[in-house]
Image (cartoon, rainbow, N blue to C red):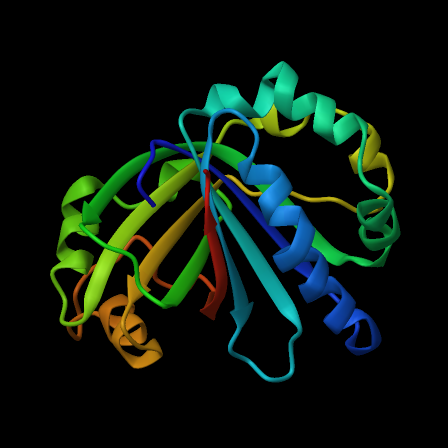
Amino acid sequence: MTAPGFLAVFSDVDAGHEIDYVHWLTREHVKERVSTPGFVGGRVFRALDDRLRRYLILYDLQSAEVLASDAYLKKLERPSAWSQRTMPRLRRFIRGGGTISASAGDGQGAFLAVVEVDDAHRRPARAEVEALAANDRIAAVRVLVVDTDRTSIRTHEKSLRSGDASFAALVLVEATGRDAARHALEGPPGAPSSLEGLAVTFYAQVFSRAAE
C-alpha cells in the first residue's frame, strides 16, 4: 500500500456465483472504483484456505476523506446493474476504511496475512511493526485503523446487502510466501506480541489495477 488512506472489503461468495463474481471484480468493479478521484489503486486477494471462497478487496486512498467525498458517494448511490445483481449474493460482508497508522517495508507481497483487531487500542506499536517487517521474506507490514463515521455512511449500495459488519483495525503482513508471513507472526518463542491469540487468515493476490 502506497497511500495513507485505505478501504478494505471482505466477502464470501457461493461456488455457483464465483466466476461471475470474479469477472465483475476484474472487468468492471475495481476499474470503476479506482477511476474515482482519491483512489490510487486496488488489489484483489483470495483466501488460501480451500474450504473458503472468501475475497478481500484492498484499495489505496489518498486519505480517509475520500470515503465521504461527493464523487465516491455518488457511485455508491448509483450502482451498476452488475453490482445490483452481485451485492445481494455476498456473504459475511465486512467493510472498513480509514487511515494507515503505522507501516514498515517498501514493497508489496503476493501473499498476505490478515489479522483482524477488534479493539483498536490493541493494535501493535510502531516498534513491533518494524520488528515484524524485519523478518525474512517480508515485504511490508501495515496497521489499518477504521474511521467509523466515514465507513458507516448509509448508501443505496449498502441497502442491497444484509448483515454488513466492520472492524476496528487490521494488521497486514505482506510476504513472498505464506510460510514467511506465518513465521513472522509467530515470532521467537516466548516473545511478547500484541496479536497473540487473534485469528489470522492467509490470502494470495489474484488481481490488481492502478488508477489511470
Q: Residue at x 56, y 43 (%)?
A: 167
Residue 149 appearing in the image: no
Asked whether, in this view, residue 62 is left or right of residue 81, the answer is: left
Q: Residue furthest front?
A: 212
Asked whether, in this view, residue 71 is left or right of residue 141, the answer is: right
173 w.r.t. 103: above or below = below
Q: Residue at x 60, y 63 (%)?
A: 55
Q: Residue at x 59, y 45 (%)?
A: 31
Asked whether, in this view, residue 82 is left or right of residue 92, the answer is: right
* Rendered location of residue 173, percent (x, y): 32, 59
Asked whether, in this view, residue 209 is left or right of residue 53, the answer is: left
* Rendered location of residue 79, percent (x, y): 80, 36
Q: Residue at x 11, y 60 (%)?
A: 134
**Residue 19 or 150: which is nearer the viewer?**
19
Q: Residue furthest bottom?
A: 50
12 w.r.t. 165: above or below = below
Looking at the figure, which quarter contains the N terminus? Answer: top left
**Residue 211 or 50: which is nearer the viewer?**
211
209 w.r.t. 188: above or below = above
* Rendered location of residue 81, percent (x, y): 87, 44
**Residue 194 or 115: which is nearer the viewer?**
115
Write down the quadrant of residue 95 in the picture. Answer: top right
Residue 80 appearing in the image: yes
* Rendered location of residue 83, percent (x, y): 80, 47
121 w.r.t. 105: above or below = above
